[in-house]
Image (cartoon, rainbow, N blue to C red):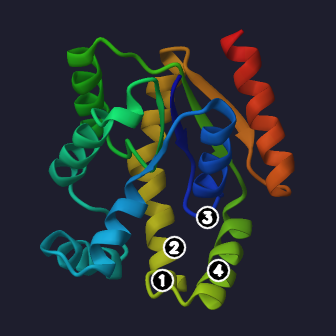
Amino acid sequence: MRLLIMGPPGVGKGTQAVGIAAHYGIPAISTGDIFRANVKNQTPLGLEVSRIMADGGYVPDEITNAIVADRLVEADAAAGWLLDGYPRTSGQVVALDEALAKSGQTIDAVISLVADTDVLVARLLKRAELEGRADDNADTIRNRMVIYTEATDPLLATYRDRGLLVEVDGIGSIDEVAQRITAALDEKLA
């Protein structure tokens, strides 16, 4: 099974991705986790990503596309995967389509978690306080929300037109949202 999970910052993509991947026996691949590991280890990529994230921006497509393409050909991804945080731009959709075409793969479904912006801002501010995330302050959160809406919402239309989009309410307990996702996927892929 090859899945994407999309939604605005703070909607719980990472949390849900881990559970979905475990449920279906596939790896959850998070571009955010890959970038944060590079930041933590202060690699050249990590230093650049750190600067970009501090400004509330996103890593350029060429860097992200190469990292994702390399990750999708690793052995644990042979039977499927769930991508979290990618694609985020039209250029990334094209790059993913090209990478999948080379390997004869297709996307089975795109999960879109939806939620009210005010709820998400409050959630992210609380997370920033609890986890000490420097990249989560009110200004950068609002900037990421604007960037998400402008850059990523059109992708949802693309996947909706392809018949792949599965929209799920992202507000509720982790278990409630997980049950909604698996029920929607099981229905779509039945």
Q: Which residue is mark 3?
A: 10
Q: Are marks 1 and 2 in contact (CB under 8 Å)?
A: yes
Q: Residue at x 22, y 81 (%)?
A: 42
Is label 2 in a helix, a strand or a loop? helix
Q: Which residue is mark 2?
A: 142
Q: Residue at x 32, y 32 (%)?
A: 93
Q: CA distance from mark 1 to mark 2?
A: 5 Å
Instruction: Specify whether 120 is left or right of 85.
Output: right
Q: CA distance from mark 1 to mark 4?
A: 15 Å
Q: Which residue is mark 1?
A: 139
Q: CA distance from mark 3 to mark 2?
A: 11 Å
Image spot of residue 75 (x, y percent): 33, 33
Above or below: residue 167 compared with residue 177: above
Q: Nearer the viewer, residue 55 or 47?
A: 47
Q: Which residue is mark 4?
A: 127
Q: Are marks 4 and 3 in contact (CB under 8 Å)?
A: yes
